[in-house]
Amino acid sequence: GKYRVVFSPEAFLDLVGAFSNLFNAQSILDNQSLSTPESLGKQIASPLLSLCDNALHPGNISAETFDGEGTPTRRISLLENGVLTGFLHSSGTAKRLNAQPTGHANIGSKVTVGAHFYHVFAGANPQQEYSLDTAENVIFIDDLQALHAGVKSLQGAFSLPFDGWMVENGKWTSIESATVAGDFLELLQSIIFVEKEEKVTPGGVCPRIWVDGLSITGE
């Protein structure tokens, strides 16, 4: 059925990472992205959500001050109150899209573009706040699995097994062998609450994210 779902910080960062082509200028130029150059300035997520990539965040233990091309790294805004505000660039992609390099180039056999350290945070003020202490019939997703197999990053679709809990009036019941499925761009629009308290993880900083109406199958 369709459930209200709360993503743990780790699980939401995993999803953002799985669909990182949304912000990757190289993917956009290669037509391997959910975005196009014209997507900038469009509302692609709930106004409650903001996101930046910040290599220099104090929580990033592998912080780099320069990318592979020698461009200084800095905080790059990607989503502001749900509006797509930026892409991640190398000097080559920046030139082709008439932008500034953002410090995201990796030099290997060819130059690639990759994120450093995502920071997800609350955007616009919510009309309503939610709490797991009083939630009824909510699924809490602790950990997503099989991200390499269950994500169609160019279609935006995902179907992923997860570890989690059914939360009912303060009572947490473990869920085993269940799957969450949906469309990533629809999920971004369906966010109903971004909690204030952020958690620093090895992959980025993120609070718990509440989403309405995701398909859950399993036991």
Image (cartoon, helix red, strand yellow):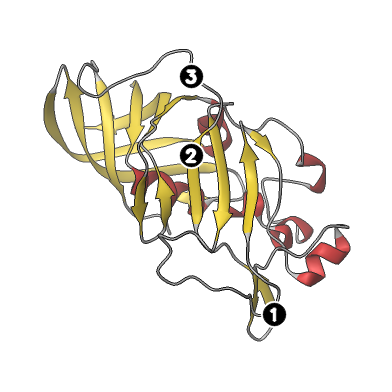
Q: Is residue 196 visible?
A: yes
Kindly state the secondary structure of the residue where label 1 is placed: loop
Q: Is residue 11 above or below residue 69?
A: above
Residue beneath disc 3 = 126
- Mark closest to the chain's N terminus, 3 or 1: 1
* Displayed quadrant of residue 107: bottom right
Please say if the residues under marks 3 and 1 sit with CB atoms less than 8 Å apart: no
At label 3, which amino acid type do we have?
Pro
- Residue under numbered circle 2: 121
Q: Is residue 75 above or below residue 129?
A: below
Q: Check disc 2 and report its element: helix, strand or loop.
A: strand
From the viewer's perspective, is residue 127 above or below residue 217?
A: above
The image position of residue 109, as x and y in percent, is: 66, 86
Mark 2 and mark 3: Cα distance apart in space: 13 Å
Q: For this view, does 106 lie left or right of residue 170?
A: right
Numbered tag placed on residue 90 in the rendering: none
Vertical order, 164 against 191 (above or below): below
Q: Amino acid at mark 2?
A: Phe
Front-lying residue, 199 or 83: 199
Q: Position of residue 132 (x, y in %)?
A: 24, 24
For label 3, the SS is loop
Which of the 4 image quadrants contains residue 105?
A: bottom right
Which quarter shows the N terminus?
Answer: top left
Classed neighbour count for the residue bearing mark 1: other residues with Cα under 10 Å, few (<14), some (14–19), many (≥20): few
Residue 151 or 36: which is nearer the viewer? 36
Q: Which residue has dot 1 on it?
A: 70
Dot 2 and dot 3 residues touching (CB under 8 Å): no
